Structure formats: C-alpha cells, structure tokens
Amino acid sequence: MKGQLLSMALVCFGAALSQAPPASAQSPVPAGAKQDEARRQVLDTTEQWIAAENKHNAAALRQIIDDKFISTYAANKPRDKDAFIKGITDGPVDPTQSQSLTDQSIVIDGDTAVIVGTDTFHSATKPPVPPLRYTITYVKRQGHWRALGEHIVTIPGKP
C-alpha cells in the first residue's frame, strides 16, 4: 500500500512539473532589470520635478505630485499638494536658478520608492543658501511614479 501511494505521489509530482511553464517564461524580465528601470524612472521623475520648480510650472508639478502629497520642511507646519505648489510657483521665475541633486540613494520596494539626496540651489541673482537634505517617497499609480511625501532639512554648516 505504501508503495502504491508513493508511486501515485511521484506520478502526480511529475505531471505537475511537466505542466509548469519553464523558469524563463515565469520571469521574462530579471528582477534586477526591473529594479534598474524603476530607479531610472524615479530619478527621471525627480529631475522633471526640479525642472518644474525652477520654471514655476504648476501643471507639471500637479502631474508629478500625488493628490495625497504632504511636504515638511524642518519643523515647519506640513503642507499639502496645493499649498506646496502655490509656495513653489509664487513670485517671478529666476532664469538663473538651477538645482543640483547629488548623494542620491534609492530604495525600491514594489510600487513604493524612497529617494534620499542633497539639493543645492544655484542663482546669479539671489544670495547663496545652504544645501538641503531631502527624502521623497514615491508611489507608482497607473504606471507613473508620483511623489507622496517629501521632507527637507537644511544641512548645517554647509555654505
């Protein structure tokens, strides 16, 4: 009886293996390639965000920033999407302003990404400001990475 049960189990196991798709069909894109593509998309989205800030492009910011967005700067009161965009786009555009993003680290976990880096402002018309350390959390919605939250602090002691 034991021999018959073992034989039946082996036959079932063999049948299951023969029906399973090959490993290459189960994962057509290696996990590392998906991670690399997600990282590239998050970096591109962050660069688009910076360009939209510098140009005061509220429409572009609305596309990048999620409706549930919240932003904090140091110990200031948190701002929602509308307040953040209003604050960024208020006043005239400084055509000499640019921003450099450096020291970036990204963690991707499914449809969530966190990027940490340094943002340095440059302007020929405004006094220098210390660099900022930022943390941005992105979520992937409808195929696009959207900024869900941002926290910024001034890096002390940096010119």
Image (tube, helix red, strand yellow):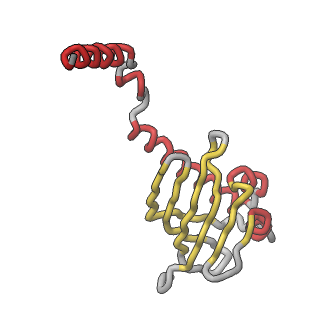
In the picture, residue 87 is in which quadrant? bottom right
Give me the residue at 46% from left, 56% from top. Answer: 106
In the picture, residue 47 is in which quadrant? bottom right
How many numbered discs, if any? 0
* Furthest residue toward bottom: 157
Depth check, front residue: 9 or 52: 9
Rendering coords of residue 22 (x, y %):
36, 20
In the picture, residue 31 is in which quadrant? top left
Rendering coords of residue 139 (x, y %):
60, 51
* Furthest residue toward front: 1
Location of the N terminus by quadrant is top left
Q: Is residue 5 above or below residue 54?
A: above
Depth check, front residue: 75 or 10: 10
* Furthest residue toward left: 3
Give me the residue at 65% from left, 45% from top. Answer: 141
Q: Is residue 70 left or right of residue 31?
A: right
Q: Is residue 143 above or below residue 1?
A: below
Give me the residue at 39% from left, 40% from top. Answer: 32
Rendering coords of residue 128 (x, y %):
59, 79
Depth check, front residue: 76 or 60: 76
Q: Is residue 83 above or below residue 17?
A: below
